[in-house]
Amino acid sequence: MNLNTQAALVRERLYPRSPQSIAAARQFTRDTAQAWGLVDRHDDMSLCVSELATNALRHGVPPGRGYLLRLLTFDGTVRIEVHDSGPGLSRILGRPPGMGLTLVGAVADDWGVLARTPGKVVWCEVRVGPPV
């Protein structure tokens, strides 16, 4: 991620450990893309948010906790990050990705995982056209 050439726009929202939060996260993503004037790849972004949030709920968010969805746009790219506080880097790194991350890898231009304390950040990037 190169944020030096353009100031990034950032929006984020916390979601509870609930299956209903997935639809809310997709809507937040669509609303954010519209607010930023992005017209390309809405479906790809929604799919990535769905898969990353679902994985966080299934594997990363401990009971009583939630996850953070952070969206950034810079240099014609949207970065989607899902932060959770559960264990799990070892469940992602060094293992073949599950179906959700396979889908993310198929539609995103890049993806990965970063450690944080506690937990991890699973992210992907989608290149989009210029804002309108």
Image: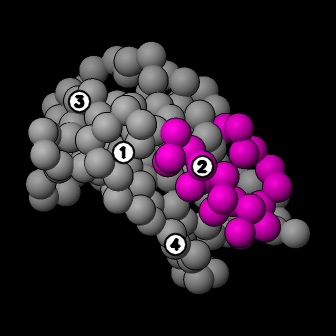
Q: Quadrant of residue 97?
A: top left
Q: CA distance from mark 2 to mark 3?
A: 22 Å
The residue singled out by tag 1 in the image is 122
Magenta segment: does it hold 99? Answer: no
Q: Position of residue 84 (x, y in %)?
A: 24, 48
Q: Is residue 17 above or below residue 8?
A: above
Asked whether the beta carbons under mark 2 and mark 4 sit within 8 Å of each other, the answer is no
Q: Which residue is mark 3?
A: 59
Please give the label number shown on residue 63. none
User: Is the C-beta separation of discs 2 and 3 under 8 Å?
Assistant: no
Q: Identify the residue under disc 4.
A: 10
- The residue tagged with tag 3: helix, strand or loop? helix
- Report the disc number at residue 27: 2
Magenta highlight on residue 36: yes
* 23 left or right, relative to 88: right
Q: Foreground residue, 55 or 13?
A: 13
Q: Residues within 10 Å of mark 2 (few under 14, many from 20)?
A: some
Q: Amino acid at mark 4?
A: Val
Mark 3: which amino acid?
His
Asked whether the beta carbons under mark 1 and mark 4 sit within 8 Å of each other, the answer is: no
> Does 36 sit left or right of 124 as displayed?
right
Residue 11 position, x and y percent, is 51, 69
Q: In terms of sequence position, does the residue under pointer 3 or pointer 4 come before the other?
A: 4
